[in-house]
Amino acid sequence: MTFIKTISTFLITLLLVTTTFGQESKPKTKILLIGTIHFETPHTDEFELKVDDFFSAKRQSELENLTNVLSQTKATKVMIERPFENQRSVDSLYNLYLADQYKLTVSEREQIGFRLAKKLKLNQINCVDKFYGLSDSLMGATAKENNQLYLLKDLGTEANLMVKDFDNKLKKGTITDVLKYINKPEELKRNLSIYLKFMAKIGAGKNYAGAKYVSDWYLRNLAIYSNIMNQVKPSDKYVILIFGQGHIPILKHLLQNNDDFEVIELNSLL
């Protein structure tokens, strides 16, 4: 009886050790989040940079230098801010680009994403965006009805100051300089605070129009996060995500709290 009990104890201990070892040895996927400005003018964002020539020799050289550095990660996937539903059309354009039959548009999704993926010798760019409409009209009407238009005014002031800072960085420095600046933790927090400090307060205690607006923004980013998880495979050691800077604070929070991922800071590479 003692012998059987000893054997049972040994098997249980072995199982626990094996399970623990398996959990500890499971490799995490490194994911580099690159928050970027939008190169197109105009874009759909209310607050954005207005003018720059990203086709100029100077900017093209900067993009080459940037993607050369990023290609050293040996990433196995590059994910961009294009709707999941557009994967087939993006595949078509990317294949034409690989065959030197397509000229990149001004979009950062192509100028950085396509260019980088080609240097990494990837067969595909991954589309992970999901668009949800934001309830602007209800929030504006609610702000007016509740004497909270000052919140929208303060929001606009803060957002314009932020964009002005980004614009000054771009005028004085390189694209890499801008990306390093806007991906600093304090700049990511600055962007997210616009939603949390101003918008979420509108309509509180009544129709919560501001909170609804912010929840729609979170919903979009949660859907993006879902697409990221769904498209990352166990064999992917390193993934690069290129998205508008405003998405990064939420995506970063979500990925940092998923132990399948290790979030890499952009400024540790550039």
Image (spheres, helix red, strand yellow):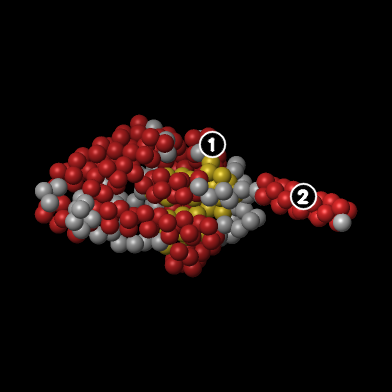
Horizontal side, residue 183 vs residue 256: left or right? left
Disc 1 residue type (three-letter): Leu
Up the image or down, 268 lies above or below 7; here it is above
Locate residue 30 relative to residue 134 in the image: left or right.
right
Residue under the image location 42 percent in, 36 percent down: 185
The spot of residue 253 in percent (x, y) is 45, 46
State the separation of the CA atoms marked 2 and 1.
Answer: 43 Å
State which quarter of the image contains the N terminus: bottom right
Q: Is mark 2 on a helix, strand or loop?
A: helix
Mark 1 nearby-residue class (10 Å; few <14, some 14–19, many ≥20): few
Image quadrant assignment for residue 98: bottom right
Q: Where is residue 146 in the image (x, y as percent from the top left)?
A: 12, 51
The reply to whether residue 97 is in sight is no
Structural crowding at the residue carrying mark 2, measured as other residues with C-alpha within 10 Å and reported as few (<14), some (14–19) or many (≥20): few
The residue singled out by tag 2 in the image is 13
Q: Position of residue 131 (x, y in %)?
A: 36, 61
At 83% from the left and 54% from the top, the residue drawn is 5
Tag 1 residue: 269
Left or right position of 234 against 61 = right
Specify whether residue 212 is in view: yes
